[in-house]
Image: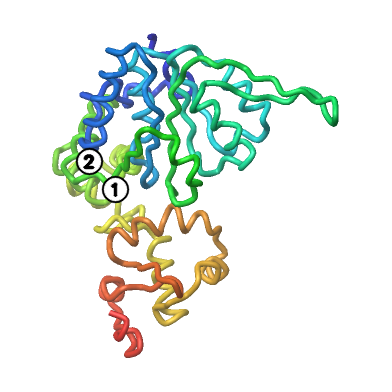
């Protein structure tokens, strides 16, 4: 399979950053081990791989793993997303364009509409697709035979998937935050590809503030490179990395300006909580999805925020981190 065929939508300037094999993919060892065994077994049997559901925080490599699976299987891959499949006809067009053994990757699969989801069931189970021709009493149902394919779904919110859809995946695998050492390796590898002069301690500083997320690490590497070229001699040392990240208002824990605003809003406007998410959104004039998907997971992971039945609560650690003292009523919650 040609590389340009595999990554038709990728930025040509950075296509080499995406690993092509399990060996090249850094991190997520448990997930890779499971996929590797199943891929090898499927190849030996000459069968399509079981359908796979990948879930976890954004930027963990779910899309990249789908491409790696397709490459390891030696098959094609088509990429779409839940919101992009609006009508039955959209789904039919995608499914009928697949070839035997192909991978269909659906990002944000939790956002599939109910009608689309139900139409997908026979396609996943029997490789058949029911389509209605015409309207009213004269309408006819036609069953199309589909090529045997593998559906790889990705989601950041597995709790929003219906039970019937989840049950149709043969493998359900969680991707976790990356270790500091794994992020350092990813950053060093990227710097070599992009010909960025990078000191290992500079890579460590970037990794520390990357929120355990490769996508963020690579984005920060590029921004630190810009800073080093404009403000320094182009070499990213530990000192230059610290200056650049401080300039971007990303602190030692990886919190950005908006993260700190969220915590301060909960603490200073609502006494540390509990406070409902809609109230927080109104106070910040921010979308709920932005807070729930891009900020809360890391704040919770770091122990700065708790979700409770009554709302969000800033933890003792959040108060201490911001140099604030919990009110007496708040102390009773800890």
Query: Which residue extends farthest front?
Result: 137
Q: Nearer the viewer, residue 37 or 194?
A: 37
Write the residue at 42% across / 79% down: 268
Vertical arrangement, residue 220 with respect to residue 254, above or below: above
Q: With 319 as the anchor, is 111 left or right in this view?
A: right
Quarter holding the N terminus is top left
Instruction: Name the mark on residue 270.
Output: none
Outermost residue toward the top in this view: 1
What residue is drawn where x is 20% and y is 24%?
Answer: 23
Q: Which residue is mark 2?
A: 183
The residue that appears at 19% across and 39% down in the rendered structure is 182
Q: Whole-Å distance between the Cαs marked 1 and 2?
A: 8 Å
Q: Residue at x 52, y 54 (%)?
A: 289
Q: Quadrant of residue 310?
A: bottom left
**SS at mark 1 in the image:** loop
Quarter in which the C terminus is drawn: bottom left
Above or below: residue 195 compared with residue 230: above
Residue 221 point in image, percent of width and height:
30, 39
Camera-nearest residue between 107 and 282: 107
Residue 21, placed above or below residue 309? above
Q: Position of residue 142 (x, y in %)?
A: 69, 20
Residue 179 locus on image (x, y percent):
20, 45
> Where in the figure is residue 284, as x and y percent of width and height?
53, 67
| Circles 1 and 2: CB atoms closer than 8 Å | yes
Specify which label sits upstream in the sequence, 1 or 2: 2
Relative to 180, 101 lies left or right: right
Q: SS for tag 2?
A: helix
Disc sitting over residue 210 in the figure: 1
Q: Residue furthest bottom?
A: 328
């Amino acid at each position: 399979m040609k590389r340009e065929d595999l990554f038709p939508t990728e930025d040509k300037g950075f296509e080499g950053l995406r690993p092509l094999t399990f060996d090249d993919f850094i991190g997520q060892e448990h997930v890779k081990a499971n996929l590797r065994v199943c891929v090898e077994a499927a190849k030996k049997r000459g069968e399509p791989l079981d359908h796979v559901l990948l879930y976890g925080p954004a930027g963990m490599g779910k899309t990249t793993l789908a491409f790696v699976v397709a490459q390891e299987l030696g098959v094609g891959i088509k990429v779409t997303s839940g919101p992009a499949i609006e009508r039955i006809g959209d789904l039919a067009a995608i499914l009928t364009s697949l070839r035997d053994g192909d991978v269909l990757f659906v990002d944000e699969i939790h956002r599939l509409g109910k009608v689309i989801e139900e139409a997908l069931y026979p396609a996943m189970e029997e490789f058949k697709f029911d389509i209605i021709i015409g309207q009213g009493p004269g309408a006819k149902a036609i069953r199309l035979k589909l090529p045997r394919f593998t559906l790889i779904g990705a989601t950041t919110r597995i709790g929003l998937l219906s039970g019937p859809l989840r049950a149709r995946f043969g493998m359900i695998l969680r991707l976790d935050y990356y270790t500091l050492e794994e992020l350092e390796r990813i950053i060093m590898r990227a710097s070599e590809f992009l010909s960025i002069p990078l000191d290992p301690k500079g890579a460590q500083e970037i990794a520390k503030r990357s929120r355990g997320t490769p996508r963020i690490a690579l984005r920060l590497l590029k921004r630190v490179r810009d800073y080093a070229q404009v403000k320094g001699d182009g070499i990213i040392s530990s000192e230059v990395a610290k200056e650049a990240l401080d300039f971007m208002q990303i602190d030692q824990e990886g919190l950005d300006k908006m993260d700190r605003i969220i915590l301060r809003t909960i603490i200073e406007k609502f006494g540390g909580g509990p406070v409902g998410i809609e109230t927080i959104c109104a106070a910040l004039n921010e979308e709920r999805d932005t807070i729930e998907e891009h900020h809360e997971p890391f704040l919770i992971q770091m122990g700065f925020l708790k979700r409770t039945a009554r709302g969000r609560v800033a933890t003792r650690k959040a108060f201490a981190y911001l140099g604030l003292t919990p009110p007496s009523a708040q102390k009773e919650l800890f």
